[in-house]
Amino acid sequence: MPEPREPQPPLKLIGHVHRGFQRMADQLLREQGFALGQLPVLMALKDGKPRSQAELARLAHVEQPSMAQLLARMERDGLVERVPDPEDGRSRLISLTTACRERMPKARGVMQALSAEALQGFSAEEVAVLGGLLSRLADSVDAMLERRLGD
């Protein structure tokens, strides 16, 4: 285990951890045919319920044009498909393809193994405390976003 680093501001450390984890996860996910940027869509659709592009954009906290581009690439790569909206024949909903669903468990295993490796050396209690603190921070940031951006 590396030597402990000098104390730094928590949000700087969170950013450092986030960027490092993203780089590792994206590389490993690409080996499975996925990309890290696709995770919000994959997670939103994993329950099998088709969703609109607007709903996916809202859940992923991205603008509609960005979501449209992401979905077009995911459709091209065979991860999602557009299905007719049963309530509005003019609209289409997005759902995961069968091939994507079949590959997701292996990708989930990759993410779980990477997370376990990152948390090696932490006791179960420390992981729980860290999770609780980060949840509170996430709630605080979400509230700030809501107040400032009306998201």
Image (cartoon, rainbow, N blue to C red):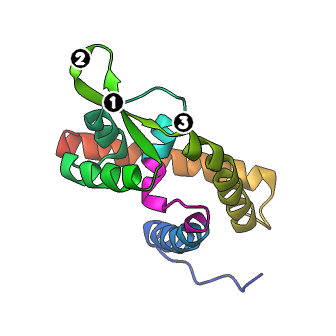
Amino acid under disc 3 = Lys
- Please, what secondary structure does the residue beneath circle 2 have? strand
Which callout, 3 or 1, points to the residue nearer the camera? 1
Q: Which contiguous range is marked in magenta? A: 29-40
- Please, what secondary structure does the residue beneath circle 1 have? strand
Residue, x 52% and y 74% (percent of image)?
Answer: 23
Give how far across and how far down residue 3 sits, in percent.
71, 86
Q: CA distance from mark 2 to mark 1?
A: 10 Å
Residue, x 27% and y 46% (percent of image)?
Answer: 145
Say above or below: 148 vs 115. Answer: above
Circle 1 is placed at which residue position? 93
Q: Is residue 37 magenta?
A: yes
Which comes before the other along the chain, label 2 or label 3?
A: 3
Circle 2 is placed at which residue position? 88
Q: CA distance from mark 3 to mark 1?
A: 14 Å
**How many numbered callouts?**
3
Residue, x 58% and y 45% (percent of image)?
Answer: 99
Circle 3 is placed at which residue position? 46
Amino acid under disc 1 = Leu
Which comes before the other along the chain, label 2 or label 1?
A: 2
Give how far across and how far down residue 43 sits, in percent.
51, 42
